[in-house]
Image (cartoon, rainbow, N blue to C red):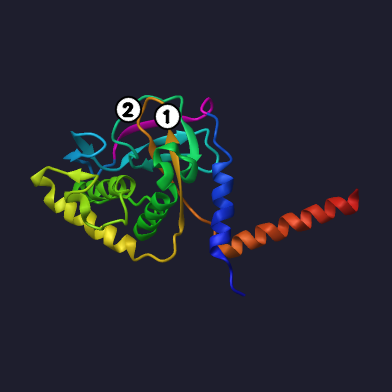
């Protein structure tokens, strides 16, 4: 039997979009970059600055389905900051399709990020600072290059730019990641965002259930409903 995976994903996406988690109960505490470290890169586009790029580590609690310690993530936006080592209140989880920062290009950006992390196998732990920074650059490229068709390897120009010559090897690795992600045909990860009105926003990546698992869950729900009707 052929399973319609796009329908399954659409249903899951609608569930995520319709269920933003309360900011009051959610606690985010990012303590540092992962042990791989980070690299300083000079960027231009949404902002012009020299910024550290790499995977973050910390803890997330009060967010059912996402709670983790350690919790790993990457930065979504470049125009705000945050502080390490103390609880950060005021965050809310929203589905990628309803995240305001993705704008009218939300479907395209969510698709790019989903394929990138499918290629990576989830929020994988980078083994060195260059790879950690390259993944972050690939995330920013996927988000900010919204003009027309997505151009792999366009970090040297267009909307999002890496302007530091010393980052050439990191840009090359990020470009290789993006090329591999572009070739992915089945997206296995859902994209949500930890969003805050004044602090930096972060990615939430979760593995989608297998279609067979969804079918079994639906069957169980139908069976439970029928059993309750019989008892009634």
Q: Nearer the viewer, mark 2 or mark 1?
A: 1
Is 128 on the left-hand or right-hand side of 16? Answer: left
Image disc number at residue 107: none
User: Compared with residue 169, is residue 23 higher up or lower down, i.e. above or below?
Assistant: above
Image coords of residue 63 (percent x, y): 52, 36
Quarter of the rendering containing residue 121: bottom left
Q: Out of 178 and 69, give the one closest to the viewer.
A: 178
Is 99 on the left-hand or right-hand side of 9? Answer: left
Q: Residue furthest bottom?
A: 1
Q: Out of 180 and 109, give the one closest to the viewer.
A: 109
Q: CA distance from mark 2 to mark 1?
A: 10 Å
Image coords of residue 202 (percent x, y): 38, 38
Q: Out of 40 and 158, give the one closest to the viewer.
A: 158
Which residue position is annotated with label 2? 82
Bounds of the magenta span? 23-33
Is 27 on the left-hand or right-hand side of 213? Answer: left
Residue drawn where x is 59% and y is 73% of the image: 2
Residue drawn where x is 13% and y is 43% of the image: 163
Q: Residues within 10 Å of mark 1 (few under 14, many from 20)?
A: some
User: Compared with residue 14, is residue 94 higher up or lower down, i.e. above or below?
Assistant: above
Which residue position is annotated with label 1? 196
């Amino acid at each position: 039997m052929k399973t319609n995976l796009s329908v399954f994903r659409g249903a899951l996406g609608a569930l995520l979009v319709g269920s933003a988690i309360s900011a009051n109960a959610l606690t985010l505490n990012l303590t540092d970059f992962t042990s791989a470290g980070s690299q300083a890169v000079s960027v231009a586009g949404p902002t012009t600055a020299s910024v550290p790029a790499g995977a973050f580590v910390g803890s997330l609690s009060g967010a059912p389905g996402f709670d983790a310690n350690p919790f790993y993530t990457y930065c979504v936006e470049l125009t705000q900051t945050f502080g390490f080592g103390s609880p950060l209140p005021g965050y809310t989880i929203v589905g990628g399709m309803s995240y305001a920062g993705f704008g009218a290009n939300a479907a395209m950006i969510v698709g790019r990020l989903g394929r990138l992390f499918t290629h990576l196998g989830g929020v994988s732990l980078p083994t060195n600072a260059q790879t950690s920074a390259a993944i972050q650059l690939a995330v920013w490229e996927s988000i900010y290059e919204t003009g027309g068709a997505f151009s792999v390897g366009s970090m040297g120009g267009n909307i999002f730019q890496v302007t530091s010559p010393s980052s050439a090897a990191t840009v090359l690795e990020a470009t290789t990641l993006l090329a591999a992600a572009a070739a992915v045909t089945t997206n296995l990860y859902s994209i949500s965002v930890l969003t805050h009105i004044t602090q930096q926003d972060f990615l939430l990546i979760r593995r989608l259930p297998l279609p067979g698992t969804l079918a079994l869950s639906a069957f169980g729900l139908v069976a439970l409903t029928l059993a309750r009707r019989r008892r009634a």
